[in-house]
Image: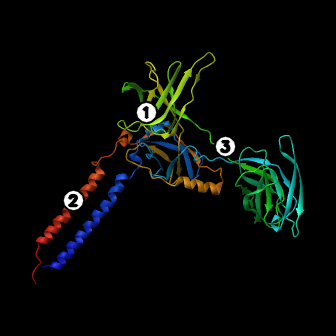
Amino acid sequence: MSRTGGEIAAKACGTAGLLRGGLFAALVLLPLLAVAGSRGDYARQWPLDLGQEESGAYRVVLDEAVYRSASQPSLGDIEVFNGEGQSLPAALLSPAQPLAQPPRTLALPWFPLPALDPAAGGGDLRLVAERDADGNIIRIEAGTGSRAGAADAPGQWLVDASRLREPVRALQLEWERPQQSLQARYRVEGSNDLRQWRTLNEGTTLLDLERGGERLHQGRIELDGQARYLRLLPLRSGPVPVLAGVTAELAPPPPEARWEWVEIEGERRREGGRDYFEYLLPGRFPVERADVRLPGNSAVEWTLHSRERGDAAWLWRAGPWMAFQVGGAGGGNQSEPKPLATPVRDRHWRLGAGSPVGEAVPVLRLGYRPEVVVFLAQGTPPFALAAGSANAQRAEAPIPALLDALRRQRGAGWQPAPAYLAGTPEELAGERALKAQHAGDWKSLLLWGLLGGGALLVAALGLSLLRQRPAQD
């Protein structure tokens, strides 16, 4: 049975279209397969013990073994997997970021003020304060110069914050339980001399609501500024709280720095007529401090450089600074470590001495603060942290924004539950994972073979169709 030229052309177009679709799909999948990472792409993994069940978010403090296993300068080759081998949303954070601490609180003395409404024409408030030897108010005498039309407004208080030496972030008010629902809006003014006042809070609503045995209490007032004395004034007439106590909310103390140190033996090098000492850092530690140790008593001025690759230019990191060590009968003294301007993860380091140091090779001590990986628990446990890969890359998740949102909902002191690196690491791909894949890996070869074969097939089909003549009717 003969076929017309139109049928042949239509069939050719359909076949070519299918081939083009297959080639397009292969082109789309090629970059995905090239960068997709799995548990088997990493050198080793550590099982994770959860400090709290079903917390949702967890933090893991990295240790020296993890830093020694990582190979990428960005630490992108650290990833968390669940029991099914699925990668979990995670981010690498500085030591202080996920470790929020509850604010410190301190009770403050307070005094009732005359019931005069400043919003209704008010009056001039005159305060006479009796202070003790430390300057704290022990008694208040208040007088008012009333104006025509001034209205009474009970519920005004003066808070004495003069003994505080740290900024107050907010005031927390406590009051007697009201007989009915309470909603009152307050303004806070501040003064350092009880004469001149400025606004520290334009208005905050205080709530005490109850329904069905449940109670909603909101007595926190944030402050925009500082003052020795604070005046709380209602913005409108109506029911006001019967105050029972005022607490100042102070900023939490800064987290204690936990410093770890890596000591490296170096080699003496001679360049341009000068002696240098070069070192190889065995891991991706976030170095922030440097120190030098020599045997016996010493006092040498040092300059520190580093670089990522052995053939790159040296970059200045610290110095010149003097590092000394002096012994004595009552114990030795030594210099403080030298801070670096920014954390550095370079592998190659070099010390230059400002004076001869003899035959001894100094020991370079590099200090760092362990970082934290925060991840979301998804899927089934057990969870594990994998590290060490020249090809896999962790996808960054918006973990810092998530932590901020959770702290706004759960309180400023909330933080992810701890998870711990447990036991000895389990070998996965080992040293093979630390070697970069080349174009000859099997995935790329397979896809390029598909692309080449498809192109040849399309070309052959096109030539065969051109040689065919349509049958004559």
Q: Is residue 4 left or right of residue 394?
A: left
Residue 14 seen in render = yes
Given residues 367 and 436, the one toward you in this image is 367
Q: Are marks 2 and 3 in contact (CB under 8 Å)?
A: no
Q: Are marks 2 and 1 in contact (CB under 8 Å)?
A: no
Q: Residue at x 66, y 43 (%)?
A: 253
Q: Quadrant of the C terminus?
A: bottom left
Residue 450 figure quarter = bottom left
Of badges 2 and 3, nearer the viewer stands 3
Given residues 252 and 50, the one toward you in this image is 252
Q: Quadrant of the N terminus?
A: bottom left
- Residue 215 picture location, percent across and down: 75, 61
Determine crowd level at label 3: few under 14, some 14-19, many 20+ residues with C-alpha closer than 10 A.
few
- Residue 307 picture location, percent across and down: 41, 37
Of badges 2 and 1, nearer the viewer stands 1
Give the residue at mark 3. 253
19 to 441, vertically: above or below: below
Q: Find the distance from the CA under tag 3 to the CA under tag 1.
A: 35 Å
Q: Identify which amino acid the numbered label 1 is placed on.
A: Trp
Give the residue at mark 2. 453
Q: Label 1: state its secondary structure.
A: strand
Q: Residue at x 26, y 52 (%)?
A: 445
Coloring basis for residues: rainbow
Using the image, tell me which numbered label, if any, was put on residue 303: none
Q: Find the distance from the CA under tag 2 to the CA under tag 3.
A: 66 Å
Q: Along the polypeptide, which appears first: circle 3 or circle 1? A: 3
Q: Identify which amino acid the numbered label 3 is placed on.
A: Pro
Give the residue at mark 1. 349
Q: Find the distance from the CA under tag 2 to the CA under tag 1.
A: 50 Å
Q: Is residue 285 left or right of residue 412?
A: left
